[in-house]
Image: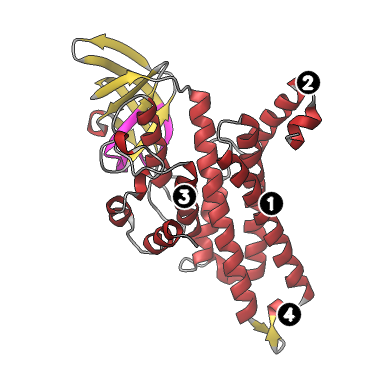
Amino acid sequence: MGLLEDTANEILAGDDPWRALEESGLTLAGVPEEAGGGGGDLADAATVLRAAGYHAAGVPLAETLLAGRLLADAGLRAAPGPLTVMSGAVEAAESRGGPVLSGTFRRVPWARSARALVVLGDGIAAVVDPARARIVEGANVAGEPRDDVVLAGVPAERAAPCAVDAAELRRRGALARAVQLTGAMSRALDLSVRYAGEREQFGRPIGRFQAVQQMLAELAGEATVADVAVRAAVRAPGDPVAVAAAKANASRAAGAVAAIAHQVHGALGVTEEHPLRRVTLRLWSWRDEYGDETAWADVLGAALAAAPDPWALVTGT
């Protein structure tokens, strides 16, 4: 492991990692320093996100990274603290002090915990004080905040033109979730292999039975294929096909990995205190966010149908 990966894993294995993440600059890894970020590139951000997925960390890390990158694109500086980003139909009325925003946003991740809400409208990025918004609390299957946010004539604290559109923001969110999914799948594999080596039945570890070995091999295969696709997309984040393939693969594999891991663990894996439960709840939640496997498979299908040479598109040749 590299230093960044070691540091991220050490911090995210703790019970309350946010403060240490901020102090180390990892909450804005991959965001330029001149924009208030920690520097580095997208691969660095992916390293931290993968570790967060592995440890099933209950922190708005992906959301803060997405918001920080969007602010940097708009030439705005990210303030310290947890952030979240939302896009949709936004009415921006001009006033002497800047734009006044109105709109409703559904299932915004971690809105109630954010120090600032970053809003992407039509050609504009703006920062809003969450205290000025109406936030209706909700949650995903894993219990992570997914809140509805209503802005009714809320003045933006800062705003600037932004070339990023809603489709690009969705792609970025999909890639971030795909990275987190691969981290969580890696943890599910590690937990399953360890349990199969420890749990004994008929006088020997269950991992020595061929049926269990086959399940572990299938689990490892699913996690590996998804990881390869996601790492390729991290290297080419501007390629919509690569991102679509990454999220489609990761979301599809997430369901298979969760099912096999629980088969290996039996009833123990669903208990409140077992780490597998926290991991698989996030696999089931994240696989649907920013588009599930069907949505991204549709994107891939449309790209293939429109390509003059579909085989070259699929193989990258």
Q: Which mark is residue 225?
A: 1
Q: Any mark on residue 157, and which?
A: none
Q: Is residue 110 visible?
A: yes
Secondary structure, mark 1, is helix
Q: Going from the N terminus, do you reach mark 1 or mark 4 first?
A: 4
Residue at the image position 69 percent from the left and 34 percent from the top: 297
The residue pinned by badge 4 equals 208
Identify residue for label 2. Answer: 308
Between label 1 and label 4, give the one nearer the viewer. 1
Q: Secondary structure at mark 4?
A: helix
- Disc count in the image? 4
Q: In the image, what residue type sits under mark 1? A: Val
Q: What is the quadrant of residue 212 in the picture?
A: bottom right
On whether residue 63 falls in the magenta region, the answer is no
Residue at the left extreme of this rendering: 96
Labels 4 and 2 touching (C-beta < 8 A): no
**Which residue corresponds to the image point at 65% horizontal and 84% vertical from the top-left?**
200
Task: Give whichever of discs 1 and 3 has the lower sequence position.
Answer: 3
Tag 3 or tag 2, which sits nearer the N-term? 3
The residue sitting at 36% across, 14% down in the picture is 91
What is the spatial separation of the Cα atoms under label 1 and label 2, in whole angstroms?
A: 27 Å
Local crowd at mark 1 within 10 Å, few (<14), some, or many (≥20)?
Answer: some
Label 3 secondary element: helix
Tag 2 or tag 4, which sits nearer the N-term? 4
The residue range painted magenta reads 105-118
Left or right for 163, reference 310 = left
Instruction: For marks 4 and 3, give the CA distance.
Output: 34 Å
Q: In the rendered view, does 204 fall on the left or right side of 117?
A: right
Gap between marks 2 and 3 measured at Cα:
36 Å
Asked if 301 appears above or below 263 in the picture, the reply is above
Residue type at mark 3: give it: Leu
What residue does disc 3 label? 49
